[in-house]
Amino acid sequence: MIRVNGEDRQLEKEIILQDFLEREGYQTGRIAVEKNGGIVPKSRYAETLLHSGDVLEIVSFVGGG
Amino acid sequence: MRFSKEEIQEALCLRHTHEIQERLDRGRVAVAGLGGLGSFVAVALARIGVGHLHLIDHDQVDLTNLNRQQYCMGHVGMYKTDALREQLLEINPYLDIRTDCVRVCEENIRELFAEDDIICEAFDVPESKAMLVNGVLGQFEEKKIVSASGMAGYGNSNEIRTRKITDRFYLCGDEVSDSRNGLGLMAPRVGICAGHEANLIVQLLIDDGAER
């Protein structure tokens, strides 16, 4: 079980962050990912393994300023 | 009419108290993107006398900007950095204002923001917003970033909020109203969001200033 944006999510098996983001339909050029209180650099998405108990906050930016 | 530095300082202290004003004087804030959000944030911070402002934008003022950005007809065609600095100095000629007329990219973040304590993300394009937030949080250990997402359209004022994502990353906006979904950007709602950014920056300056 991991927590994503305040919701519990069941993971059948461990998954790489990059794969999780793609599976969930996130556009990786428009997001910032915080895991357990710290930001995950984009360069580490492909090597970050999500474990049970991880808390993720994925911020998706929309246009306008 | 021109006032001395002491007169302006006294007027600010009368409104804010000496203790608070000292913390605002010491503030070092960068505003990245000088559109509807950034121009509003910069004016608000200049009015209360935040001592060191760093204005960053590569673009010129366009007539279509005037529906929400703090520029006037006479500024059309000027670089936003120059047009905004001119206005801030009209409010308070003794502020330390640095301008950089450049496009921010991952490669220049470290050098560009080296002297700023708080960075206000005020870009328009979502990819630029994400680039700056990831860049600042990834390349610096201490600096804080206040970002904005979701302020297009009108109405629903109370859906615009400020959220703390981490100790160094705050997000303002409703997080959904995308300017690309046919919703225009209009002064009132962009102003509410910019107000959230500016108000949080003030809170960080005053509360963190108390710890020093």
Image: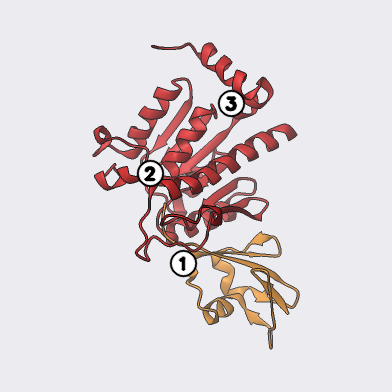
Chain colours: A orange, B red
Residue holding disc 2: B57
Of helix, strand and loop, which one carries label 2? Answer: loop
**Residue B120: percent from left, percent from top:** 51, 45
Left or right: where B66 falls relative to A28 = left
Q: Are labels 1 and 3 on one chain? A: no
Q: Which one is earlier in the sequence, the residue at label 2 or at label 3?
A: 3
Q: Amino acid at mark 2?
A: Asp
Expressed as whole percent of the image width and height from the top left, the position of residue A22 reads 52, 79
Q: CA distance from mark 1 to mark 3?
A: 37 Å
The residue that mark 1 highlights is A29
Residue under the image location 58 percent in, 68 percent down: A44
Mark 2, Cα crowd under 10 Å, few <14 / some 14-19 / many 20+, is many
Of all chains, the one bearing label 2 is B
Q: Residue at x 38, y 29 (%)?
A: B87
**Residue at 39% from the left image edge and 23% from the top image edge:** B90
Q: Nearer the viewer, mark 1 or mark 3?
A: 3
